[in-house]
Image: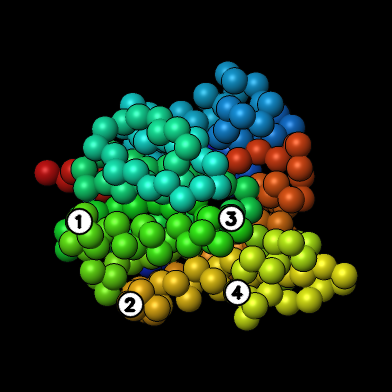
Amino acid sequence: MKPVIIKSTLLSQFNNLVHGVSTILGGENNSPFKFNLSINVGDDADIVSRNRRLFFNTLNVEEENVVLQEQVHGCNISYADRSEFIKENDALITDKENLFLIVNIADCIPILLFEPKTQIAAAVHSGWKGTEQEILSHTLDKLEKDFGVKAENLFVYLGPSICKHCYEVDHDVAQKLPPEFVASGNKKYLIDLPGINLKILKESGVREDRIQISSLCTFEMKNLLHSYRRDRENAGRMFALIGMRNLS
Ligand SMILES: [Zn+2]
């Protein structure tokens, strides 16, 4: 089965920009992990490698041109100019064509950024720890400092993640986040990670009409998306990918 890949209408306006978020749908689909792209969840390595090839082929991306990272819910941000696997890292930036950045997700927010003037792409992994550490605002700072990227010229897509009605946490996590994005639930707290990241974008000067937030909730959409909080040890992972293609 051809993979179902989610795209942003905002980012789709750029001819040379390749992007997409995988789903549970694709491939042979006979694994308990469904269409899973992570080698670290206990899925069969051969199935994962076939799934990855299928995902990349569908986007017309060469597997040897991707950048992967070992996400640790930290705040390390790396520039990549060649295909590699970067350890202990949660955000990637490139100005190279035909190099595709990957964030691996199942509830955390994949944040894909593109600046068409200077042709810079970035991909950020932001769960509650990344959001608490404001990895997105550190990425925006680095984009400006190292690459001269102005926030007002950025286009940003927040891909599918667990929504504010579903992301239940205990007090210890809730108290680390801005109170206006925490609601009291049934003895628990509900946190709004897309809301916090949207605020960061707006306060940094990204134009509201250049921000798109996916309305798809990973936790709720069990027929479409992987969710770690829903499926725990049976949860697969999705890839969110962004990069610029050389069209000449
Ligand atoms: Zn939800």
C-alpha gap between disc 4 and disc 3: 13 Å
> Is 155 placed left or right of 95 in the picture?
right
Q: Earlier in the sequence, mark 4 or mark 1?
A: 1
Where does label 1 land, which residue?
147
At label 1, counting other C-alpha atoms closer than 10 Å, the crowd grade (few under 14, some 14-19, many 20 or more) is some
Which sits earlier in the primary sequence, circle 3 or circle 2? 3
Given this view, does label 4 or label 1 mark the residue nearer the observer?
A: 4
Q: Which mark is residue 205?
A: 2
In this figure, which residue is indicated by the disc labeled 4?
Answer: 178
Question: Which of 28 and 44 lies nearest the eye of the viewer?
Answer: 44
| Mark 3: few/some/many CA within 10 Å (<14, 14-19, 20+) | some
As measured in the structure, the alpha-carbon distance from the residue carrying label 1 to the one carrying label 2 is: 16 Å
Q: Residue at x 36, y 74 (%)?
A: 204
Does the numbered disc 1 mark a residue whose Cβ is under 8 Å from ligand 1?
no
Gap between marks 1 and 3 measured at Cα = 26 Å
Q: Quadrant of the N terminus?
A: top right
Disc 4 from disc 1: Cα separation? 30 Å
> What's the residue type where badge 2 is placed?
Gly
The residue to which callout 3 is attached is: 129
Type of residue at label 3? Answer: Lys
Question: Picture coordinates of residue 34 (x, y %)?
Answer: 67, 36
Give the mark, 1 or 2, whose residue is nearer the N terminus.
Answer: 1
In the displayed orientation, state which residue is furthest to the left: 248
Assign a secondary structure to mark 1: helix
Distance from Cα at disc 4 to Cα at disc 2: 20 Å
Q: Residues within 10 Å of mark 2 (few under 14, many from 20)?
A: some
Using the image, determine if residue 6 lies above or below residue 191: above
Q: Amino acid at mark 1?
A: Phe
Q: Callout 3: helix, strand or loop?
A: helix
Residue at point 40% right, 33% down? 86
